[in-house]
Amino acid sequence: MNDTRGEVLFERPDWLEREEEALAPYAMRTSLSSGRLHPEPVHPYRTLYPRDRDRIVHSTAFRRLMYKTQVLVNQTSDHHRTRLTHTLEVAQISRTIARRLGLNEDLTEAIALMHDLGHPPFGHAGESALDECTRLEGGFEHNLHGLRLVTELEYRYADFPGLNLSFEVLQAQAMHSKRPESPELAAYLGVGRPLLEAQVVDAADSLAYDTHDIDDALSLGLISCADLEQVPFWTRTVELIRHKHERLPPLQFQPTAVRALIDWQVSDLLEHTLVNLRQAGIRTLQDVRAASKILVAPGEEVRALKAELEAFLHERVYRHHRVMRMAHKGQRLLQGLFDELCRHPDQLPERYQARVANAPLRRVVCDYLAGMTDRFAQDEYLRLFQPYTPL
C-alpha cells in the first residue's frame, strides 16, 4: 500500500507460518534454529537462511571460487568447471532434491553455496601442499578452513568477525569435515546425524562432481567415449538415450548423456531416500538425528555403478599425466610461496601482517595462500621470484 508520502510499504508475510504449511515434519524450520553467535535484529522481509545464502554469495571467498581449480587449472580451457561453477551446479541439484523431499530449500542452498569455500588454489593438490606446510600447526583441511573463513577471516561487517551465519549452516560445514577430532568442531558435533538438508548437499556434491568430471575430461581430451565403454554406468546411460533419441546429432550426444546420468542419479536418490524415511519411521528432526544411518542415499545398484565410475575417474582422469603435472606444479608453487613468506613476513599484505601479533605466523601465511585463486598464486610467485616481473 502507499502512504501519504508516496513511499511503498509492504505487508510482511508470516514466513514462519508459511514454513509450517509447506515443509515436511522432518525439515529444519527457522523457528527451531539455534540462531547466530552474534545476535542481530530480525530482518523485515528475509528470514535467517536466505540471509545466510546472500551473505555467502556476496563474500570475497565465494567470488574467488571463479578462478579456483576443480580438476584442471583455469588456464586449461574457458569451458571446463571451476569451483564456482561446480558450487552453483551443486546448489541447483540440491534445491531440486530438497523441494521434492519437503525440506528447507533456503537452508539447503546456503549449505551448498558454502560447502567449497575453504578450498585453496590448485584443488586437492593445493590442499595437500598446505597440509604438509602446516603439519606442526595441525595441518590444513578445506572444510575446517571454510569454517574459519565464515567465522573469522571474512571482514565485510563492522559488528562481528566473519559472516555470522546461522548455527545450522556452520554445523553442516563442520560435520562434513574429515577431521572430527579437531577442537574447533566440538561445539557443532555430538548431536547425531546431520540435518537432512546437509545430507542432501553431500549427496548432490558427490553425484555432481562424478558426472561433471566425466564431462570435462571428455571435452578436454583426457579420455574418449571409447574409454568409457568399460564403465557400466556410462554404457547403460548411453543405451537409454539411444533408445529415446533414434537420431542424436554428434554435438548433442555428450551433453545429453551427461544430463541423463545426472537425472538417473537424482531420481534414484529421491526414490530410495523416501523409502529410507518411511522404513525408519522418520517424523521429526529428533528422528533424523537419531537415525541409524545416513538417510539421503542412492540404492544399492546405483551405489555400485557409482563406485565403478569413481574408480575409473581416479585411474584415468585424476592421475592423467596432464592433471598430475599441473598438480605437482601447483604444489611446488605453494611450497615456495609458503617458505618465502615465512622467512620474510614483511612481504605479506598489511592486513595479514597485523594478524601475526595474535596468531602463529605459519597459520597466517597458510590463510593468505589458501585464499588465493590459481591465477593470483601464479602471479604472486612471479612477483616474488622473477626479478623483472612488475611488483
Image: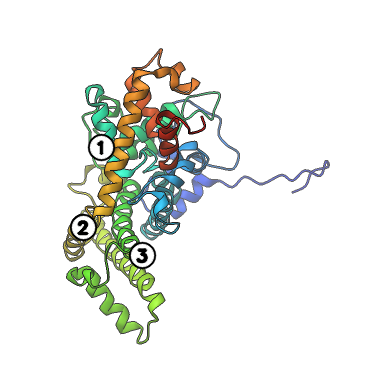
Q: Position of residue 192 (x, y in %)?
A: 23, 39
Please determine whether, in this image, residue 208 is positioned above or below residue 47.
Answer: below
Q: Residue at x 29, y 36 (%)?
A: 332
Find out whether the residues at labels 1 and 2 contact each other: C-beta distance under 8 Å: no
Q: Which residue is mark 3?
A: 219
Q: Secondary structure at mark 2?
A: helix
- Tell me the kind of residue under disc 1: Ser
SS of the residue at dot 1? Answer: helix
Residue 262 at least partly seen:
yes
Residue situated in front as seen by the camera: 187 or 368: 368
Residue at 71% from the left image edge and 44% from the top image edge: 9
Q: Which numbered disc covers residue 256? A: none
Can you give x and y, in whole percent of width and height, for residue 161 in the image?
47, 25
Which residue of the protein is positioned furthest toward the top in this rendering?
Answer: 357
Residue 148 higher or lower than 206, as above or below? above
- Which of the two discs, 1 and 2, labels the residue nearer the N terminus? 1
Q: Which residue is mark 2?
A: 310
Image: 314 above or below 362: below
Badge 3 local density, few (<14 within 10 Å), some, or many (20+)?
some
What residue sits 48% from the left and 34% below the top?
A: 389
* Amino acid found under the numbered disc labelled 2: Glu
The residue labelled by disc 1 is 128
State which tag comes first along the sequence, 2 or 3. Answer: 3
Report whether 123 appears left or right of 179.
right
Q: Position of residue 40 (x, y in %)?
A: 53, 28
Of the two numbered discs 1 and 2 in the rendering, the one whose residue sits closer to the viewer? 1
Marks 3/1 in contact by CB < 8 Å: the verdict is no
Within-10-Å neighbours for mark 2: few <14, some 14–19, many 20+: many
Quadrant of the image occupied by residue 33:
top left
Query: In the image, what residue type sits under mark 3?
Result: Ser
